Image: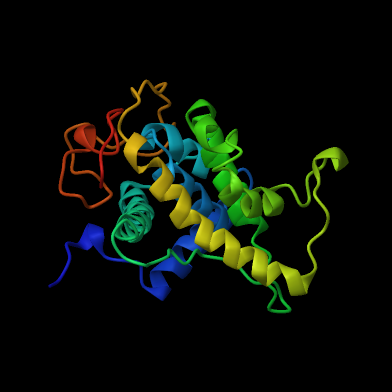
Amino acid sequence: MSHPPFQQALTEAELDRLTGFLDAIGSPAMNIEMLDGYFAALICGPEMVPPSEYLPQILGENFSFESNAQATDMMGLIMRHWNTIASVLLNTLEEPDVYLPVLLEDDDGITYGNDWALGFMRGVQARPGSWRDLIDSDEHSGPMLPIMLLAYENDPDPALRPPSVTNEKREEVIEMMIASLTIIYRFFEPHRWSLALTPPDVPLRREGPKIGRNAPCPCSSGRKFKNCCGSNSPTMH
């Protein structure tokens, strides 16, 4: 059975296009690995964070799309990637499945995973209070350890840096991080929709063409922009 366009996973070419788009923006935009980790945390957490809040974190507070065509194209790719992560994690509730994150390699073919972990922790920080049941629990906080190990490995504050991870050990830590994602998602499932959502309205500022509130949403969901990515209410794309 075929899926609607907005539910289809990105092809390799589309993922490359999204990667290039983010790289072209540069700082303070996230790269594709950090975006992947950020989305994973937002989807795992007990509170829904709306696009009006998380898009400026991904693209930068002052980012402007060059045109409506670019907004439609890139927002469609971003939201489809969200849907892919959400779909795989949802499947882990009933199947022995894992989400395989997007991890970049350096010129020597080494995968470090630091940007993914940093993105995940930025997602945690979007709603830090709601993550306390996990992070502060002696019994349940274990799955956060490999993520925090990689997130703080190169922290500017030496006091926050854990012992360095050797390349031989790194692969094992990344495997633990992947397995931990399923555990974290399952942990928060009973709480996912239990907390009230009161996000600040953080509109994405742009100098280029503005998407009309009644125009079709550029994420290709088929809904009006005001009822989808332009809304502050929790929606699944």
Q: Where is 69 relative to 171, above or below?
A: above
Front-lying residue, 89 or 114: 89
Residue at the extreme right of the image, as rendered: 158
Which quadrant is the N terminus positioned in?
bottom left
Total number of numbered labels? 0
Q: Identify the image quadrant of residue 188.
A: top left
Say whether residue 60 is visible.
Answer: no
Q: Left or right: where does residue 23 sit relative to residue 55? A: right
Front-lying residue, 85 or 106: 85
Residue at the extreme left of the image, as rendered: 1
Say whether residue 116 is visible.
Answer: yes
Q: Where is 138 relative to 98, above or below?
A: above
Image x and y of residue 96, in percent = 36, 67
Image x and y of residue 65, in percent = 42, 45
Q: Identify the image quadrant of residue 114.
A: bottom right
Could you tell me which residue is drawn at 29 percent across and 38 percent down?
229
Could you tell me which residue is drawn at 48 percent across and 45 percent down?
41
Image x and y of residue 8, in percent = 26, 65
Q: Identify the image quadrant of residue 15.
A: bottom left
Q: Left or right: where does residue 43 sit relative to residue 134? A: left
Colouring scheme, one of rainbow, by chain, secondary structure, one colour: rainbow
Q: Left or right: where does residue 189 sit relative to residue 105? A: left
Q: Where is 144 relative to 134, above or below?
A: below
Could you tell me which residue is drawn at 26 percent across and 44 percent down?
236
Image x and y of residue 120, in percent = 55, 47
Residue at the extreme bottom of the image, as rendered: 108
